[in-house]
Amino acid sequence: MTRKYFGTDGVRGRVGEAPITPDFVLKLGQAAGRVLRRHIDAGRHVRVVIGKDTRVSGYMLEAALQAGFSSAGVDVVLCGPIPTPAIAYLTRAQRADAGVVISASHNPYHDNGIKFFSESGTKLPDEVELEIEAELDKGFSCVESRELGKAWRLEDASGRYIEFCKSTIDSNVNLKGLRILVDCANGAAYHVAPAVYHELGADVFTVGDTPDGFNINDGVGATHTESLSKKVFERGCDVGIALDGDADRLIMADASGHVYNGDELLYVMVKDRMQREKIKGVVGTLMTNYALEKRLGELGIEFVRAKVGDRYVLEQLKAREGWIFGGETSGHLLVLDCQTTGDGIVSSLQVLAAMRRQGKSLKELTADLKLLPQVLINKRIEKGFDWKSHKPMNDAVAKAEEQLKGRGRVLIRPSGTEPLLRVMVEADDKALAQTLAQSIADTLS
């Protein structure tokens, strides 16, 4: 069944344009409420936890969502501005039936979105999202007044989440003496992340911690790390931590000029955990650097690639008993014995704990992982072009893969938003990667 509103991470779009309008969000809340009541049917009011990031549109959408749930007979617990993974945790901690986040993650302020969590703190299954879409088509109908849902605010939501984050590393690990620069992206973690590191003993310096409703992700955060290393150097810090607008993504940097992406940070966490227990396997995505796959193989760790999107990484992890580590190059990292979803703060604590346990810098911890150069060429194609059956391209790909055995890989994938085919080649030699990528792209001219 084709999705009408839900994407890989909830419903998202530009505010004021369908579907991110107050009338639609009200109907979405009601439809989700009706589906939840149908699934639970426990003779009590269903309860949902709602959080948001710092976008100005959050006020409007929160009110609409609350009204929608209330009209369906669902109670609402409002948490205010708080990271997306905090809602995953608070949904479990409050024994709520679902969690909802109003956020467009790393997008600019004029976008927003609605994403849902199940009672166990994981993204809703595809079939439930499709059920909500079907319910939307049935139109609006309000329950009787005596059945309406109530709403209240969880005043200490941030404090509860701060304590949860601190609990995810060993109590004998502290950050005393560590100087940390934290870039909060002017987003949902602005009042949470600095407190976590400070309470664990670190000296904390902040940027991107003055949200005004419009500056979320604006030149700051995990998607704008061009000057992160420079700021780390200028403040005399040991490490820099960059989160995105809803704090489910993590990028780090040191004063030497190196920015560490999700592949490198995932490697640090996995290798550190190997010292204490056996790691069965790790899940990456189609975009994960081949060097990580190869290095994990050398360490005897199985590696599996999922489709791009942290929900697909989670699906692959859950399909394999005892697998807990997964992630994306972009910084969505999963450590399932710590948190049920990608969590930038929790992931950063696993990396910082590795640094403290081993007495090494990030540079030293990643010294034996040399990421391969990547070359990406976008080729415009005709709508409906059957690229999978295009013989000249397939022949060029086969030839390139033969040359790259053990040295790299080829990835061909269509854009999800434009009539483009993305040709990506990784190799231990950038010139070779460029030559092979161009030879494949030229077959599409």
Image (spheres, rainbow, N blue to C red):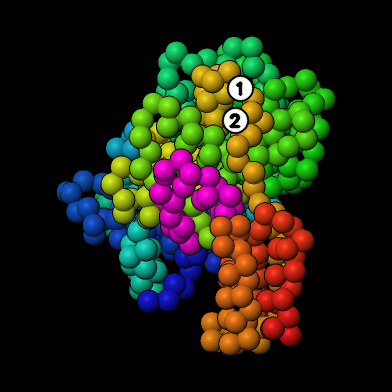
* Disc with the residue nearer the chain's start (2 vs 1): 1
Q: What element carries label 1?
A: loop
Nearest the eye: 194 or 12: 194
Q: Quadrant of the C terminus?
A: bottom right
Which of the 4 image quarters holds residue 402? bottom right
Quadrant, the N terminus: bottom left
Q: Say above or below: 82 vs 430.
A: above
Q: What stretch is highlighted in magenta?
A: 287-314
Q: Residue at image x 67%, y 23%?
A: 180
Name above or below for residue 337 compared with residue 17.
above
Name the residue located 33 percent from the left edge and 62 percent from the top edge.
Answer: 128
Give residue 383's position: percent from left, percent from top.
62, 86
Q: Can you give x and y, in whole percent of width and height, for residue 40 in the image?
A: 22, 53
Residue at image mark 2: 365
Q: Which amino acid does label 2 sit on?
A: Leu
Quarter-wise, where is residue 427 in the image? bottom right
Residue positioned 47% across, 65% down in the render: 6
Lateral position of residue 45 relative to residue 176, left or right: left
Percent position of residue 18, x then y: 57, 69
| Callout 2 touching callout 1 (CB < 8 Å) | yes
Confirm whether residue 103 shows in the render: no
Identify the disc placed on residue 360. 1
- Residue found at x 60% / y 37%: 368
Q: Give the CA separation, mark 2 to mark 1.
A: 6 Å
